[in-house]
Image (cartoon, coloured by chain):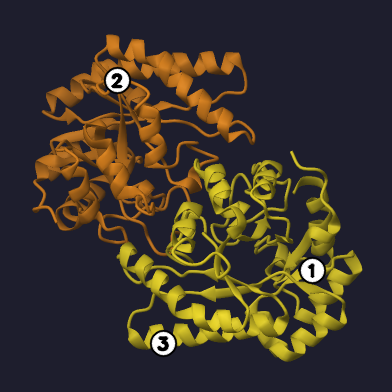
Chain colours: A yellow, B orange
Amino acid sequence: MSPRLELSRLSLNQITIDQCSLPEAIEACGRAGLTVIGPWRHKVAETGVEDAARRIREAGLRVSSLCRGGFFPAADAAGRRAADEENRRAVEEAAILGTDVLVLVCGPPVGRDLEAARAEILSGIERLIPHAEEHGVRLAIEPLHPMMISERSAIVTLGEANDLAERFDAPRVGVVVDAYHVWWDPRLYAEIARAGRRILGYHVADWLVPTADRLQGRGMMGEGVIELRRIRAAVEAAGYDGPIEVEVINREAWARPGAELVRAARDAFAAAA
Amino acid sequence: MSPRLELSRLSLNQITIDQCSLPEAIEACGRAGLTVIGPWRHKVAETGVEDAARRIREAGLRVSSLCRGGFFPAADAAGRRAADEENRRAVEEAAILGTDVLVLVCGPPVGRDLEAARAEILSGIERLIPHAEEHGVRLAIEPLHPMMISERSAIVTLGEANDLAERFDAPRVGVVVDAYHVWWDPRLYAEIARAGRRILGYHVADWLVPTADRLQGRGMMGEGVIELRRIRAAVEAAGYDGPIEVEVINREAWARPGAELVRAARDAFAAAA
């Protein structure tokens, strides 16, 4: 088991308080004593990326990663070109925001062909690398829970994310370990060890029993059944000592005041992450 | 791709029409031209197992498997003894019903310790084997979708089921491949090939997009996105040529007349399984 976490490790993944604007999120972080944030592109777009970067910087916050690029599989060549353009913009936004990590949620298959989707994801990453390198941004493949395969990502295990990442040089492509997405995997600890220095981010939330909402039903750390301390110890043993993003996507929580949620996230982080 | 399926391969997994009694299910099978059924213990219990066996036999039906034994992890020794007794009864019921396959849904972890749950499952199977052997019943480990880990099964991948099964002699312990539970797995085809002659059953349903109910939201074959023909071809290439159970667990469908659902299952089986 790892020692108690310093608050300085905590990054607020912005979707945890999707009901708030970026300025509101920045203020809530400041009031709760947080120093790191993981913004989402749709929230950054509300103020514009340059303005967002300035606000974050002036508030004294660091950016752990940008969520998200990806969504590579497309129905046709025009769709692939549109995805490529969107991903290049995401790279540029990450650089402007001052983070070198762009999280990739790889996208669901189009139709039934999973293997084709996985091949498209590989080639989409390949095409994005030169632009990412030029901007000093690393691509972080995040495997998602298999229950989200048809809406979010055809990449559903850390093993598969490692397979993909290992096709490329280590400084360019890595993985994100999100405890909520991977905790069920019998190969989890072997794959965390294998990922090693390719781990570019670690995300936490908890698995509620029962899980009422398949896509937006995550719990705060300690409310569910994930062995968070054990997973963190493995991630740290693999060599990761960067920010830990609290990413609690919960539809019901979005009805609560953002500042209250950030305080709850901070306390749950200290108690259970 | 495999050739069109003969109707004689189709077994009605009884939970597909959980709203019907066993006598009603038997009648619906007969009217739809089905010759195989996969009963569930809670339905068999309604008439008693001897009576159920007689009714099934007199209707000219065969039994593909009995659902289900398992649920091994328990909070204490008394819980483990109770599970052991329940599982021995399940073995006896399978034998009385005339099937040599008892499906094991292994049960969720108690609390957070997944590794302990998996160890308990291994030792639970180990303890059950002598009784199963005595009754000529094989134990078929069914990995379930990872989204069901906290309600149904700590065994969530075919690879893990294969690992477990290989701890024992092949005629005693095997696996069930259920397309709904395993289709998302990047290692699926490798693990089907590895399972080979240990495959003791093949189940079909379809993954609806979106999936509205995490536990009881399956679609009929062809309504969703699973590459069912490809998975069946792999299962057959691995050596399995036994019954294929249609197991469509769908809460909304249980409001429909059972006979109508059985006809729909038969037609979907021919068209898409």
Callout 3: SS: helix
Q: Which residue is denoted by mark 3 in the rendering?
A: A81
Q: Mark 3 lies on which chain?
A: A
Any part of residue B228 in sight: yes
When the figure is inspected, residue A98 is found, relative to residue B114, above or below; the finding is below
Badge 3 and badge 1 in a common chain: yes
Q: Which residue is denoted by mark 1 in the rendering?
A: A36
Q: Determine the residue positioned at 52% across, 25% down.
A: B119
Q: Determine the residue positioned at 19% across, 51% down.
A: B269
The label shown at residue B169 is: 2
Q: Nearer the viewer, residue B179 or B160?
A: B160
Q: Determine the residue positioned at 46% across, 19% down.
A: B124
A210 vs B69, left or right, is: right
Question: Is there a contact, CB below 8 Å, between mark 1 and mark 2?
Answer: no
Q: How many marks?
A: 3
Amino acid type for the residue under numbered disc 1: Val
Task: Return the x and y of residue B133 as percentages of the image width and height.
Answer: 29, 13
Chain-order first, disc 3 or disc 1: 1
The label shown at residue A246 is: none
